[in-house]
Amino acid sequence: MNSPVVEKNSNQPQPSARNQDLAKRFAWEIASINVHLQQLRHFWAKTLGVSGPQWMILMALADLDKGDGVPVKVVSKMLHVDSSFVTTQSKMLEKKGFMRRKTWEDDARVVKMSLTDKSYKHIANLASQQEALNKFIFAEFSDSELTEFTGKLASLKDQFEKACLKVAMDI
């Protein structure tokens, strides 16, 4: 018995081609979001008179510090930058009075950073603006949708990290 012949519509892309097109579109949308995030970081940084990357270091410290400082290595890992970059930038931030750097008593090779009262005051003054902006940006999402979406993005980030390692090992 002959199997039926299914005629393919040549105008419709096959699933793999469609997935490739979606993946490209997704990559462009993420790249565009990143540009806008950089613009927002620059705006917030400008209010403090610091650079965008310095702003990110301050925000990382605000999120990570539980009262005893945060090692340079932890901040550099969170920001996906080299520790020497965080060290250089944190010294500049220290000179401007936005942070303290202190050698850890247990290991002199480890420098722990913490925000100053000046930083906390500036961040608190911007909090309502940031909250209103986040409300505007994420208005389309319910709390559960945003939680689910954030989880999916975290999984995707993990896959991208693995992909980078894979590509690096194959080169």
Image (cartoon, rainbow, N blue to C red):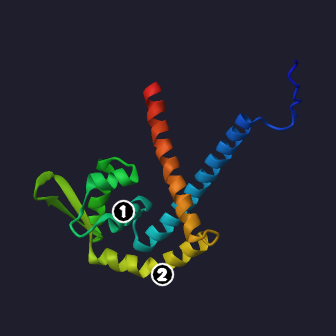
Snapshot quadrant of residue 105: bottom left
Query: Label 1 amino acid?
Result: Ala
Instruction: Name which of mark 2 and mark 1 comes first in the sequence.
Output: 1
Query: Label 2 amino acid?
Result: Ser
How far apart are labels 2 and 1 at the CA level? Answer: 19 Å
In percent of width and height, residue 107 lies at 12, 52
At 28% from the left edge and 66% from the top edge, which residue is drawn? 65
What residue is pinned by disc 1?
A: 60
In percent of width and height, residue 24 lies at 66, 43
Residue 171 seen in the current view? no
In percent of width and height, residue 130 lies at 49, 75
Number of other residues with Cα within 10 Å of mark 2, as a class: few under 14, some 14 to 19, many 20 or more:
few
Q: Nearer the viewer, residue 98 or 156?
A: 156
| Residue 109 falls left or right of residue 125 | left
Q: Nearer the viewer, residue 33 or 66?
A: 66
Which disc number belongs to residue 109?
none
Q: Nearer the viewer, residue 101 or 64?
A: 64
Label 1 element class: helix
What residue is pinned by disc 2?
A: 128
| Residue 112 falls left or right of residue 156 | left
